[in-house]
Amino acid sequence: MIPQKDWVRDLVIYQIYPRSFFDSNGDGVGDLPGVIAKLDYLSQLGVNALWLSPFFASPNDDNGYDISDYRAILPEFGTMADCDELIRQCHARGMKFILDLVVNHSSDEHEWFRKSVKREAPYTDYYYWRDPVDGHAPNNWASCFGGSAWEFNEERGQYYLHYFSKKQPDLNWSCPALKAEIHELIRWWKARGVDGLRIDAISYLDKPADFPDAEGAPMPDGYVFPSLLTGRPGTHAYLHELNEKLFTPLNLMTVGEVSLRCDAELADYVSDERAEFDMAIPFLPPIAEYGQHVPTMLRDRLKTRYDVVPGGWWAQFMSNHDKPRQVSFFGNDGEFREVCAKALALVNHLSPGTPFVYQGEELGMTSIHLSSIDQYDDIGTHNDYRQRLLAGDSPEAAFKFAADLSRDNARTPMQWNASANAGFTTGTPWLKVNPNYVDINAEAQTSDPLSVFHFYRRLIALRGAHPALKNGDLQMLDGGNADVIAFSRTAGGETLTLAANLSDAPHAAPQGLTGEILLQSHERESGFDGVTLRPWEAVLFAAKG
């Protein structure tokens, strides 16, 4: 009998970026023993699943998303024994453990690639190799990190494809031996106790056999992003096979990071009849959201995705390791930081699907403001800066753009207390700590019942107490103003209604709001007056019958 994953929709998933979470040994880098040390904090928060960004062996060209050995732990993160203990300790607390699997590409320092360079069987075709065309790269494809998506290897005398960094060669899923290797790898990690997989950059597995030039406007460096790689039929065939042979028989929860040409494609990955993923993280580069009117963008996205996905189930998130901090990017991290953090949390957790919490989000952590491009670690930030200069921006404008969108905004060390380095490490942190840690930190907030932390704790607990938050139908409501989002969730004779003013100005409240107030972002002040929503005021109502 095939196990039924009836537990998947009960999850509230907390994402940990291990390098920045907690350093147990003073080397300046977070590690697996550091995660173990903070599990009781996560239990107090109330999450019941942990997703850890990669901690495999890696040269760290892209901070662990370039894997050189899928069955080894990067020494600065700990040992395999530490990993086993972390999984055991999670299970002891009723938490699921979700592995971040990166199988669109590996590191160029992986044994597979080294042997493929030498044309050793069976590794010869583990990657995409092509001869030069007229002495140049096979086509005009752009890499996500700038420049050509092709790199010439002198030893093999051919170009290899890398959709991301040149140190991240794409794996060739059309090679049966490679595909079998990855299938076995998944079984190996399941045997170690892994409960689920978050699968990185999974929309690009299949490649067109003729590798045609990409169409569209070139980047400032002359190359064109190959949109023809996204969501090809072959990719869906690979994913369906993974589900049929591994995900379902092994009772593995799965979430795919997917790139979409339109929201309607989300259903291709998560609808029941497709039998691919339990849920998907729709990836949007921050540039696609930069400068948008946030309430309109969030409202339209929620409605469109609910309409196209049967059952309305996908990953609900505003922050992760690839995005700036939500309170800074979508909101106001100054005067209204606390109420803004709470309002955005209500919108995210009240929406259909599985809520994800990125480390520090539950404290209202903000993006960092560094003074020069040299202070940034992220390869993508440096590429954004370079591309803007090539496009004619001044150094000041290019720097502001790159800094606003930088992935390092989410990767600054977790702010545990007001001691040196925010209590993250006794050594020198690998990335600068945000100076506001003195005021924004876990120690202060866990002792303050009205903090952002305790708001998240109550919000997560509500999900377990109200079936409408998990299974309720969604109805969008007229907020009466473009800055106000309003919607309801209904199930089991109960309706929960949210009205949220996502702006710095007061607005009239929507008409007809009734029921018991369960949560409100302005909980430190006098209650909702029923007439006006203050700046970043969000109110959750429950009505029976």
Image: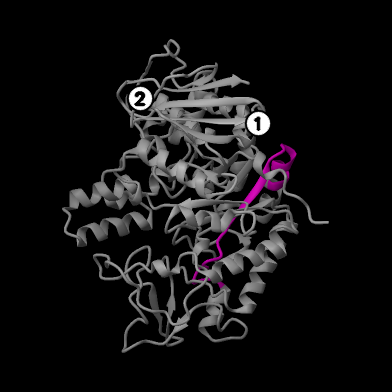
Q: Nearer the viewer, residue 299 or 197?
A: 299
Label located before the other in sequence (2 or 1): 2
Residue 108: in magenta span: yes
Counting from the top left corner in percent of width and height, residue 458 is at 58, 24
Q: Which mark is residue 467?
A: 1
Q: Residue at x 22, y 52 (%)?
A: 398
Three-letter amino acid code of the residue under disc 1: Pro
Q: CA distance from mark 2 to mark 1?
A: 31 Å
Horizontally, residue 543 falls left or right of residue 227, namely right
Q: Looking at the figure, which quarter contains the N terminus?
A: bottom right
Q: Nearer the viewer, residue 87 or 100?
A: 100
Q: Residues within 10 Å of mark 2 (few under 14, many from 20)?
A: some
Residue 27: in magenta span: no
Q: Residues within 10 Å of mark 1 (few under 14, many from 20)?
A: some
- Identify the residue at the far right of this view: 1
The span shown in magenta is 87-110
Which residue is the site of mark 2? Answer: 336
**Secondary element type, mark 2:** loop
Q: Is residue 293 visible?
A: yes
The answer to which image quadrant residue 241 occupies is: bottom right
Q: Looking at the figure, which quarter contains the C terminus?
A: top right
Q: Residue at x 41, y 66 (%)?
A: 165
